Image: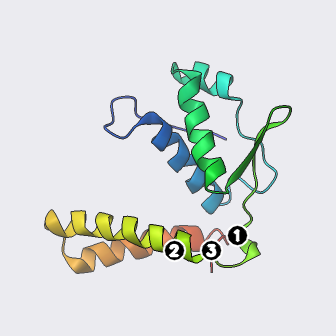
Amino acid sequence: MILTVDITSDVPIYQQLRDRVVEAIADGRLAVGDSLPATRALAADFGINFHTVNKAYDVLRQQGLVRVQRKTGATVSKDQSTGPPDAAFTEDWTARARTLLAEAVANGMPAAEVQERCRALLDGFVDKGRTS
């Protein structure tokens, strides 16, 4: 699995790592049981502190997407076929989506373009057979 981060971005590196792993799960590049790179190895690859990678993996663990064990490391644990997300996830996701949509509107993106881009992104995951 190849992860990319932008060291110069305003988005914290741990968040970028978390986001790339979530995208890899959603588009099928990572499946249940797949191992994530070891924290020290990934940190060395990016030239970042291993605590940054630990933080990303911990966020993923808290979100139920990975399991972290001392002997085996981090592995993907979320199987999207297990059913719909719980209400708390849905409420949190809706709040984050609202903010992203508000940013688009505040920056002058026409609603039709926002919808088109959202549909194209979602279709990219649907085409991979990962969502319904």
| Of marks 3 and 1, the one in the foreground | 3
Identify the residue position indicated by label 3 in the image. 85
At label 3, the amino acid type is Pro
Which secondary structure, mark 3? loop
Q: Position of residue 28 (x, y in %)?
A: 68, 60
Direction from residue 35 to residue 25 in the image, left or right: left
The disc placed on residue 95 is: none
Q: CA distance from mark 3 to mark 1?
A: 9 Å
Query: On the image, numbered disc 1 is attached to which residue?
Result: 80
Q: Position of residue 118 (x, y in %)?
A: 39, 72
Give the residue at the far front of this rendering: 88
Is the residue 68 above or below the residue 82 in the image?
above
- The residue pinned by badge 2 equals 90
Cβ–Cβ under 8 Å for marks 3 and 1: no
Residue type for callout 2:
Thr
Q: Earlier in the sequence, mark 2 or mark 3?
A: 3
Query: Which tag is nearer the camera, tag 1 or tag 2?
Result: 2
- Residue 95 in sight here: yes
Q: Residue 128 appears in which quarter of the rendering?
A: bottom right
Measured as percent of width and height from the top left, residue 57 is found at 62, 41
Q: Earlier in the sequence, mark 1 or mark 2?
A: 1
Q: Position of residue 34 (x, y in %)?
A: 78, 48
Q: CA distance from mark 1 to mark 2?
A: 14 Å
Look at 47% across and 73% down and name the residue there: 91
**In front: 74, or 113?**
74
Q: In the rendered structure, are the residues bearing label 1 and label 2 in contact, judged by CB atoms less than 8 Å apart?
A: no
Classify 10 Å Cα crowding around label 3: few (below 14), some (14-19), many (20 and above). Answer: few
Q: Are marks 2 and 3 in contact (CB under 8 Å)?
A: yes
Distance of label 2 from label 3 (alpha carbons) = 7 Å
Viewer can see residue 27: no
